[in-house]
Image (tube, coloured by chain):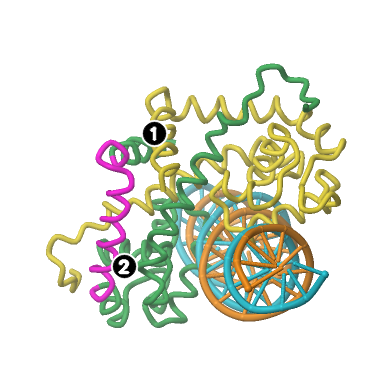
Chain colours: A green, B yellow, C orange, D cyan
Amino acid sequence: MNSIEHKHFNPSLCISNKVRQVNRVIANIYRKYLSPFQITDSQLTILFVLTKKGKLPQKDICRGLHLEKSSLNRNLNRLVARGLISKVDFPFVQMTDAGIELVNAIIPEWEKALKETEELLNQDGVLAVDLLTQKIQRS
Amino acid sequence: MNSIEHKHFNPSLCISNKVRQVNRVIANIYRKYLSPFQITDSQLTILFVLTKKGKLPQKDICRGLHLEKSSLNRNLNRLVARGLISKVDFPFVQMTDAGIELVNAIIPEWEKALKETEELLNQDGVLAVDLLTQKIQRS
DNA sequence: TCCAAAAAGTTGTATTTACAACTTTTTGGA
DNA sequence: TCCAAAAAGTTGTAAATACAACTTTTTGGA
């Protein structure tokens, strides 16, 4: 018997917790497929952004990903250390040949991760993710 | 111009990235309200679980939250260090009086965070989160 | 051309997260 | 009752994340 004074308190309504749990489960699926390449899904996301959009300054990558600049900087530095991207053309960040090669090699496994996630979530779950993504683009 | 060999490659389909972005935006809303109490939303979730269900062994908390046992252990140890929970009754973890007091004090701010999140997501977004949560309960 | 302010990028610090490997506790069959 | 195996809990390690505070670069007005 607890001593909570708030009669209508219902922690199962906690949206943050629900989203964190969903995030953990999906992150674990992706990790399974990506870890043999010693790359994380956050790092891969950044590689995808640079592959698709060419060279970008860090602030533009942050904005696109809703990522705090210090977090991005840390991620980028690990990718630079791996030789997958280059910051030499300051302020632009761009893919290296090794980075492009890694992206080409990893896409089949990434697609498997996507497929397994789609099977877990089903069509309505995938649409739910899309809806949520649209909601946060407005913030 | 990129050198991607996979013709139909579309990284904007990456569910993991979308979920991570949604998670960051919502986590940032909660942090805004909770940080004055020097508590994080992960820690608060654990306090809520223990408040609602009384004393539990760590494995049951892990299962309920889809949280890896080492992550839980770390979170718990920070709460023990704050005097908010106790592990003395091994293997059970339970709230302390200070913990119950903190939960009572924080609920109004937590409800504000929930409200702001509901306003961002709207009814259909909140239902989308619920749907996703149901999907992962089956995994 | 100069320079203060703003913006962008970097670093210190702390928390969260998970895998791997370890230690401790529990379980259940002999 | 004993003990091997399983389960639960702990610790080392590394990556992600964000706030705060710092340094470097850019901007635009004087």
The secondary structure type at the circle numbered 1 is: helix
In the image, taking residue B27 as reference, residue B46 lies left or right, namely: right
**Label at residue A55:** 2
Where residue A106 appears, as percent x and y from the top left, is 28, 72
Q: Within 10 angstroms of label 1, few (less than 14), some, or many (20 or more) residues? A: some
- Residue A88 among those drawn in magenta: no
Pick the front one: A52 or B119 = B119
Q: Write the start and end of the magenta stretch as one range.
A: A104-126
Asked which quadrant contains residue A10, the reply is top right
- Identified at 41% across, 38% down, the residue is A136
Left or right for A57, reference B40: left
- Residue A121 is a magenta residue: yes
Q: Is residue B50 above or below residue B115?
A: below
Identify the main secondary structure in magenta: helix
Residue B64 against residue A2 in the figure, above or below: below
Which residue is painted at 63% across and 47% down in the image?
A: B60
Q: What amino acid is labelled 1 in the image?
A: Leu
Q: Is residue A23 above or below residue B125?
A: below
Residue type at the position of mark 2 = Lys
The location of residue C27, given as percent across then percent down, is: 66, 58
Residue at 43% x, 62% y: name it. A42
Number of the label disc, if any, that sits on residue A60: none
Name the residue carrying label 1.
Answer: B131
User: Which chain is disc 2 placed on?
Assistant: A
Element on which disc 2 rests: loop
Q: Residues within 10 Å of mark 2 (few under 14, many from 20)?
A: some
Residue drawn at (77%, 47%) of the image: B93
Q: Are marks 1 and 2 in contact (CB under 8 Å)?
A: no
The residues bearing labels 1 and 2 have C-alpha atoms spaced at a distance of 38 Å
Query: To which quarter of the image does residue D27 belong?
Result: bottom left
Q: Position of residue A52 (x, y in %)?
A: 25, 62
**Quadrant occupied by the N terminus of chain B:** bottom left
